[in-house]
Amino acid sequence: YVRMRGKTLPVNTVEEMKKRIIVEKPGTLTSFLEKFNEYMHVIAGDREAIKRIAREFVEDKAKEGVIYVEVRYSPHLLANSGVKEIPWNQEEGDLSPDEVVRLVNEGLSEGEREFKIKARSILCCMRHMPSWSKDVVELCKKYKDEGVVAIDLAGDESLNCEANPEHMEAYEEAVRCGIHRTVHAGEVGPASVVKEAVEVLKAERVGHGYRTLEDDDLYKKLLAQNMHFETCPISSKLTGACNADFTTHPVITFMKDKANYSLNTDDPLIFNSNLHHDYQTAHQHMGFTEEEFKRLVRSNHSASFLPSSISSHQSLLIQDIYCKTSKCKLCFKD
Ligand SMILES: O=c1[nH]cnc2c1ncn2[C@@H]1O[C@H](CO)[C@@H](O)[C@H]1O
């Protein structure tokens, strides 16, 4: 397949590829993000692959027991035309970011029908590519009723800390048009990035947000505001965002303070992980009780970016293993 597309990979088997991609030991956010260079040039620009990955993503989540998921990606990083600076050294082709979004929407919808769960998407602006952000918010507007629920700002916070004016303009437009907003902030960057995300970009959720805890005033304010933190325990260990010792993890503080947060995977491929692993880690190493999991399920439900009329009935981010082991009464799955 790789050869058929005129692309090359440095290996010949899936196993060898996994070895190159999977992060096993704690590293840095930058080294994690560099893993995308290993394979994105093969997928980007390939209509069939993009749609298939979206569909199979829903399959994987359904198998994990998830019944509602919000998945995020950068449409520009999968395109090879209509992008200023075509990514991954691709030759120019004819797949635009707009068509990428349509393909992902189709793949997710097929997956929804086939696997009987709900999947929505969040489109990412990239910190190092401010010139893409206007397109991203326009795509969020265009596909608002076809599965796209929010805008995000992703990328390497350790290199690009302060939001560029173009990101700010995109987020202003999102506010104006009623597009939901989340921002990766305080993962490896300081608490000031979180403050900017909330106060300037008007984020309704914070991606990761661990380093919020370094600014006590900000943390108290966000607790009072019921700000949602999208935490990712396994990711935070392997990107070096948090200490590898889970018993001192910021999520434990969120739990003790009854903060509004969720447990998420971030990148199951590169971390060779899944949601079970994050929940299990919380249970085994962070002292999570059944009560706390139940509280999480309820708060995740209202933090979802679905319209409230839908979210109050059908959207529970909940995990099978947890339901089975605890006979969870909250699980609406039929
Ligand atoms: O944990 C993260 N922090 C910052 N950026 C990330 C993280 N995970 C992924 N991406 C970036 O967001 C894009 C969409 O997933 C990816 O292409 C990657 O560059």
Image (spheres, rainbow, N blue to C red):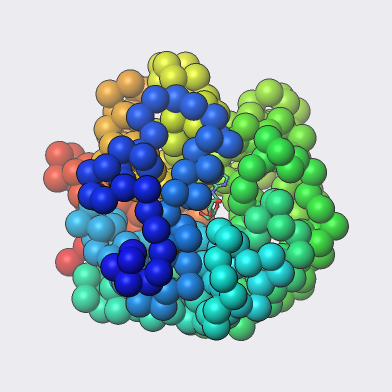
Residue drawn at 53 percent across, 35 percent down = 31
Left or right: residue 215 compared with residue 98: right
Residue 26 location, quadrant? top left
Residue drawn at 75 percent across, 59 percent down = 130
Query: Please, is residue 137 above or below residue 301 in the view?
Result: below
How many numbered circles does the render carry?
A: 0
Residue 88 location, quadrant? bottom right
Residue drawn at 28 percent across, 23 percent down = 284
Question: In the picture, which quadrant includes the C terminus?
Answer: bottom left
Q: Can residue 123 be seen in this snapshot? A: no
Q: Can residue 322 be seen in this snapshot? A: yes
Query: Please, is residue 49 above or below residue 64 in the view?
Result: below
Residue 198: x %, y % from top left: 72, 48
Residue 318: x %, y % from top left: 30, 51
Question: In the picture, which quadrant includes the N terminus?
Answer: bottom left
Residue 182: x %, y % from top left: 61, 55
Left or right: residue 203 compared with residue 321: right
